[in-house]
Image (spheres, helix red, strand yellow):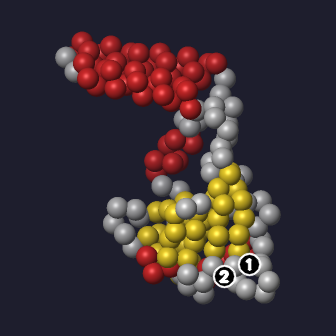
Amino acid sequence: MAKNGTSILEWNAPEHEHKERSSDWFWSVGIISIAISIVSIIIGNIIFGILILVSAFSLALFINRKPEDTHVLVNEKGIQDNKIFYPFETLSEFWIDTEHPHKKIILESKKALMPLIVVPIGDEVDTNKLRSHLENYLKEEYHSLPLVEKILEYFGF
């Protein structure tokens, strides 16, 4: 939504796509994690086995939590996702991904440790207006979701 004729766009969107998991999903994750931890203890790596069990337990606690809304602000200086600000000087390219049910902006950063940044787009946002605003500051180049996110989506995370 544009505010008072300025080139500011802002919206609220869930931080991630929420999926309800069945009890079968939890049983699968539990059995796999217990098997991995038993194998690692047999091999002699007790700490890794404990780490797997603690990780599976914390995953089970937090996985069905509803996503919080994130507030996104796009202005002349950059993009702000909640409290994190990405100045246009640190970004090189963008892509608006509308192929998924939850639209996203995929930003390529000039920083080596943070190559791709994914920002959710709300349903009420006009993607054409957003695209034309971002084209003033960044080059539009196709980017797909990072491999890790694709794998996590495939396994239902």
**Label ID, residue 133:** 2
Question: Which residue is rendered at x = 66% and y = 82% of the image?
Answer: 133
Question: Which residue is rendered at x = 50% and y = 79% of the image?
Answer: 88
Q: What's the residue type where badge 2 is placed? A: His
Q: Quadrant of residue 7?
A: bottom right
Q: Could you say whether the residue bearing mark 1 is in a helix, strand or loop?
A: helix
> In the image, residue 129 lies at what x, y percent?
74, 78
Q: What's the residue type where badge 1 is placed? A: Lys
- Residue 90 shown left or right of residue 62 in the figure: left
> In the image, residue 98 lies at what x, y percent?
68, 62
Do the residues bearing badges 2 and 1 touch, measured as CB atoms within 8 Å?
yes
Instruction: Say whether residue 100 is visible.
Output: no
> In the image, residue 23 lies at what x, y percent?
64, 18
Question: Which residue is rendered at x = 60% and y = 83% of the image?
Answer: 76
Q: Report the quarter where the N terminus lies.
A: bottom right
Task: Judge by depth and name the residue closer to the eye, 104 or 1.
Answer: 1
**Label ID, residue 79:** none
Q: Could you say whether the residue bearing mark 2 is in a helix, strand or loop?
A: helix
Task: Judge by depth and name the residue closer to the eye, 85 or 63.
Answer: 85
Which residue carries the number 1 mark? 129
When the figure is inspected, residue 31 is found, relative to residue 54, above or below; the finding is: above
When the figure is inspected, residue 99 is found, relative to residue 89, above or below; the finding is: above
- Residue 122 shown left or right of residue 111 in the figure: right
